[in-house]
Each structure stands twice: as C-alpha cells, then as structure tokens.
Amino acid sequence: MTQGTITGGWSFVVAAYSVTTAVFLIYGISLIWRLRYEQRRSQ
Amino acid sequence: MNRAFPLGIALLAVAVYCGLIVTAGEQYLHADLSLGIPSGVRTLIAFLAGLAAVSIFLGGDDLSDSSKPKILLGIGVAFILAGSYFGLFVAPPEQFMGETQRIMYVHVPTAWSALLAMTIAFVCAVVFLFRTDFKWDARMEGSIETGVVFAFLLCCQGAIWAKPTWGVWWDWDPRLTTTAVLLFAFLGILALRKFVDDPVKRGIWSAVATIIAFVDVPIVYFSVKWWNSLHQQQSSPDTVSKPFWIPLRANAFGILLLMTAFIMLRARISALRLEHELAPPPLETVGEPA
C-alpha cells in the first residue's frame, strides 16, 4: 500500500484550468462566428 | 413549445436547489434548507431534474432563435466561475492527492457532459431514423461535435492529472483506451458527414454509425468496474467529502449548461447549412438567343 501526499501540483492545476478555459472559449467563439456566417449566407 | 424554455429553467432551478443550494446552506450558513428531504433523495431529484431540463431545452428547441442558447451559455459561465472559485480557493486540498485533486472539479463534470452529449447524439440518431426529420439530424451533428470537443478536453485534463499522480501522461488502461476509442469513433462520424453530399444518405449513414459508436459509452462508464485498472472507480456522494461537493456540483451544472448551449448553437449551424444546401440555385442571367 503506497502512502504519502503528492506535494506541489499547483502548476498542473493551473494547466488543467487553462486548457479547459481555452477549449471552451475557442469552441464557443467558433460556434458564434460560424452561426453568424451561416445567418449572413442564408439572407 | 413556447413554454419549453421556462419549464426547463424551472426544472434547472429545482436541480440547483436540491443539488447545490441546500449543501451551500448547510456548509456556509449552517442553515437547514432541505425541507425535510433526505440527502440521497435530494441528489436523485437534482440528477433527474437536471436531465429533464436538458431534454426540454434540446427537445423543445425550434432552432430559429439564438437568444436561448446564449442565455444558457451565460448561466453556465456564472456557475463555472463560482465553482472554480470554490474549487481553487475555498475547498481544502485532498489528503493524498494534495492540490492536484482540484483538477477533479473540471475533469469529472467534463466526463459526465462528454458521455451525456454522446448519449444525446444516440437518441437523436434513433429519432431521426424513425421520423426522418432533419431537425434531429442537426441536433445529432451538434451533439456529436460537442461530444468530440468535450472528449478531447477530457483526455487533456486526464493527462495533466495523470502526470503528477501516476508519473505518466498516458497509460493504455481500459478507461483511457475506451475513451480514446470513443473520441476517434465520433470523430470518424464527423469525417463521414463531410464526405457524403446527399443529405438523406448522410443523415442515415451517420445515424447508423452513431448508434454503433454509442456501444462504447456504457463500456467507458463501466470499464473501471469490469477491469480493476489504474483509473480509480466512480465516486458517489457517500464517498466524496462534503467540502468537495460545492465546487464539483457548481462546475457540473455549469459545464452541463455549456454543453447544452453548444449543442443548441451547433444544431442551428447545421440547420442553416442544410437550408442552404437544399435551396434552389440562383437564376443565371441568360442572354437573348441569336
């Protein structure tokens, strides 16, 4: 049975939250951009 | 149908009250807001009401008005900001995983939403095959793409968590392998849709492929139970300490709403593209015959 606590780790936490924010932001913006493009095209 | 959105919001409010507000009241205000409902029943109500809200948002969506997904997007972002604040600055570090455990507050809700998006794609595929209504094809494409984005994000978050915990970025453990298979299977369906020009064939073929690919969803979920592997088993409210509930549940609601809004927006894009595809070609100016 392994014991102990993982020390440090904040850099990994920051990396995970940054990747999450970036993916949601980029995908959300791409959706709004693509929707506006399709709406313009259909007019 | 016009009442669908307010009904979804009301169900969401019930889910948030049972899943989040009562727990926040207990922990930070020391107030009993449970209305006498036991904890397990509250969790079940929150789960079912949340699922019903998502079903109503997606099923009652007429694909014409873009304001509704933007409202859900706004509410979702507010939940994620609150959940991330509690997850990063208020919740204590975990006994063994230390600070690294804070990744769970985004990783676990992303996993739930990724599997749910693919389940929604499966439901849309079945309904499309029975009704041949292209509204369901648009919803299917929306859920597949959103599911792929969430599954990709899930793998990235998992790799970042695995490095300090397991010592490696990736391991061919059953949970990780089945998730990678799921990601590439649904990515393949998106590729298939790009290669087929006929909308009817595209809809039917991708619906059938979605139903086949969905077989992997329960395998992903149960993989940690079926094979005693490196990835830990699912937690339940009984096995998660109460200080971790608020950030986990707030982010779960936030990411769920983001997923719903993304599917709704993406379905509108698909519907508009199809409308453009099926529109008659513009009349060309023809000169007078000689």
Image (cartoon, rainbow, N blue to C red):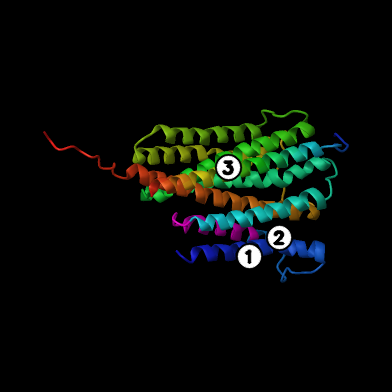
Please state which amino acid type lies under the numbered disc 3. Tyr
Where does label 3 land, which residue?
A27
* Disc 1, SS: helix
Which residue corresponds to the image point at 68% horizontal and 55% vertical from the top-left? B79
* Mark 3 vs mark 1: in front: 3
Of the image marks 1 and 2, the number of the one nearer the N terminus: 1
Please state which amino acid type lies under the numbered disc 1. Val
**Residue B281 drawn at (x, y percent):** 29, 41
Queried whether the magenta region covers residue B64, the answer comes back as yes
Quadrant in which residue B62 is drawn? bottom left
Q: Is residue B149 left or right of residue A37?
A: right
Where does label 2 land, which residue?
B20
Quadrant in which residue B15 is drawn? bottom right
Residue B101 visible, this orientation:
yes
* Disc 2, SS: helix
Which residue corresponds to the image point at 47% horizontal and 40% vertical from the top-left? B210
Task: Give me the C-alpha separation between circle 3 and circle 2.
Answer: 27 Å
Chain holding disc 3: A
**Residue B81 drawn at (x, y percent):** 71, 52
**Looking at the rendered structure, which numbered label has been put on residue B14?**
1
Q: Is residue B197 left or right of residue B74?
A: left
**Residue B270 drawn at (x, y percent):** 44, 45
Q: Nearer the viewer, residue B36 or B15?
A: B15
In the image, the segment drawn in magenta is B46-65
Residue B138 visible, this orientation:
no
Queried whether the magenta region covers residue B181, the answer comes back as no
Task: Give me the C-alpha separation between circle 3 and circle 1.
Answer: 29 Å
Q: Is residue B104 left or right of residue B203?
A: right
Give the quadrant of the N terminus of chain B.
bottom left
